Amino acid sequence: MKRILIAATLIAASVGAANAQDATAGATVFKKCNACHAVGPDAKNKVGPELNGLDGRHAGSVANFNYSDAVKNSGITWNEQTFLEFINSPKGKIPGTKMAFPGIKEEADVKNLWAYLKQEGKAK
């Protein structure tokens, strides 16, 4: 009985670890984004808007960035779920967006990226 309990505990711990978001791994994934986007204390708009304070922010609301009408009128408020859907297929989630990025398909990569953005991208 004791062995079964230990095995169950180990399995539960490994599943929890596999589902955990890893901001350090997200920093590596962000390398796919940093040609167009910035995050962190010195972040500025580039080809794409800076990503500080993304969680809870309305799409199309960063000052001094020229968004497409599609993004401005999308009605999206960014959270983990809307980000996951968008970054998987930007043009699929918001038809008419100017974002030319094809997307990130691996859910673990997207979740890690979200953890990184939330950690590094505190609102200014």
Image: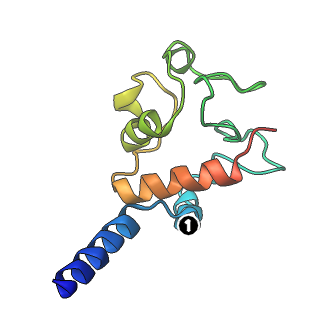
Q: Residue 25: image x %, image y %?
A: 52, 67
Position of 116 relative to 51 (above/below): below
Specify whether 104 is left or right of 97: left
- Residue drawn at the location 69% of the way across and 38% of the way down: 53
In-image side of 75 versus 60 (left or right): left
* Residue 63, quarter of picture: top right
Q: Secondary structure at mark 1?
A: helix
* Above or below, comparing residue 111 to residue 66 in the picture: below
Q: Residues within 10 Å of mark 1 (few under 14, many from 20)?
A: some
Residue marked by disc 1: 28
- The residue lying furthest to the front in this view is 1
Q: Amino acid under label 1?
A: Thr
Going 63% across and 28% down the picture, which residue do you hit? 57
Identify the coloring.
Answer: rainbow
| Residue found 35% across the figure and 72% down from its top | 13
Give coordinates of residue 88: x percent, y percent: 37, 43
Tell me the residue at 45%/53% (across/down). 111
Place of residue 115 in the rendered image (x, y in percent of width and height, measured from the top left): 55, 54
